[in-house]
Image (cartoon, helix red, strand yellow):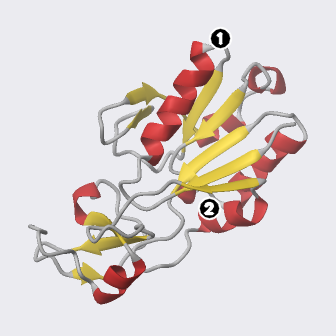
């Protein structure tokens, strides 16, 4: 029975590395997959998914996925979506169609909330529609579970206002526990 999975975590929790490993595991067993990301995610170059630890693999964009025929889609054992927080409500409902009507498992990886602690539209819809939710965990500098994404400026000050999406600024984000996110505390060893 196909299911829709949403695997979410804070910045630095290895969501993309997990997506690439899931793709590898399917294909190592002779099962085709589609690796997909929203077109707005241009950080890693054209049609490429890249993790911080150096893993990378070509992908297609979500709008290209939607243009595939049913026969082309059903040739895949699984569809893996990276940066799923950037999906629209309609795109998440398309994934539901793939799972419920075509029987294709879909695994989505993404952030749950932004640096202000607000849900991304795609994450909201996935939290509502997913069959299975799984947190990909990482830790704050204090050792507690990091649940929040802190955006900081060139002076190391944690920001709580601004545009929800700033692509290509991975060096301006860090995962923090709730307490340190609320305090804006990047830790005693943090250097800008």
Is residue 124 shown above or below 131?
A: below
Is residue 92 shown above or below 64?
A: below
Residue 189, position as x, y percentages in the image: 11, 69
Q: Which image quarter: residue 149?
A: bottom left
> Is the residue marked by circle 2 packed among few (<14), some (14-19), or many (20+) residues within 10 Å?
many
Give the mark nearest the N terminus, 1 or 2.
1
Q: Residue at x 62, y 28 (%)?
A: 34
Q: Residue at x 70, y 30 (%)?
A: 78
Residue 102, position as x, y percentages in the image: 87, 34
Question: Which residue is under mark 1?
Answer: 30
Q: Is residue 129 something that shows in the picture?
A: yes
| Left or right: residue 86 compared with residue 148 | right
Q: Is residue 160 something that shows in the picture?
A: no
Residue 55, position as x, y percentages in the image: 36, 30
Residue 180, position as x, y percentages in the image: 31, 81
| Left or right: residue 99 compared with residue 12 | right
Q: Nearer the viewer, residue 168 or 145?
A: 145
Q: Nearer the viewer, residue 69 or 93?
A: 93
Residue at the extreme front: 143
Question: Which residue is under mark 2?
Answer: 122
The quadrant in which the N terminus is found is: top right
> Is the residue marked by circle 1 packed among few (<14), some (14-19), or many (20+) residues within 10 Å?
few
Q: Residue at x 34, y 45 (%)?
A: 43
| Left or right: residue 142 compared with residue 145 | left
């Amino acid at each position: 029975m196909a299911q829709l999975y949403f695997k979410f975590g804070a910045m630095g929790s290895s969501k993309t590395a997990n997506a690439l490993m899931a793709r590898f595991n399917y294909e190592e067993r002779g099962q085709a997959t589609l690796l997909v990301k929203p077109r707005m995610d241009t950080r890693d170059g054209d049609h490429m998914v890249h993790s911080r630890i150096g893993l990378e693999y070509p992908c297609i964009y979500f709008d290209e996925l939607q243009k595939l025929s049913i026969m082309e889609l059903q040739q895949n054992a699984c569809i893996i979506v990276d940066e799923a927080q950037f999906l629209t409500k309609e795109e998440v409902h398309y994934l539901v169609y793939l799972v419920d009507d075509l029987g294709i498992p879909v695994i989505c990886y993404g952030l749950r909330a932004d640096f202000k602690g607000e849900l991304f539209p795609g994450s909201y819809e996935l939290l509502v529609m997913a069959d299975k939710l799984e947190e990909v965990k990482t830790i704050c500098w204090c050792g507690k579970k990091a649940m929040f994404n802190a955006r900081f400026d060139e002076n190391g000050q944690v920001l709580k206002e601004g545009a929800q999406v700033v692509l290509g600024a991975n060096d301006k984000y860090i995962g923090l526990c709730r307490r340190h996110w609320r305090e804006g505390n990047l830790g005693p060893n943090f250097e800008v």
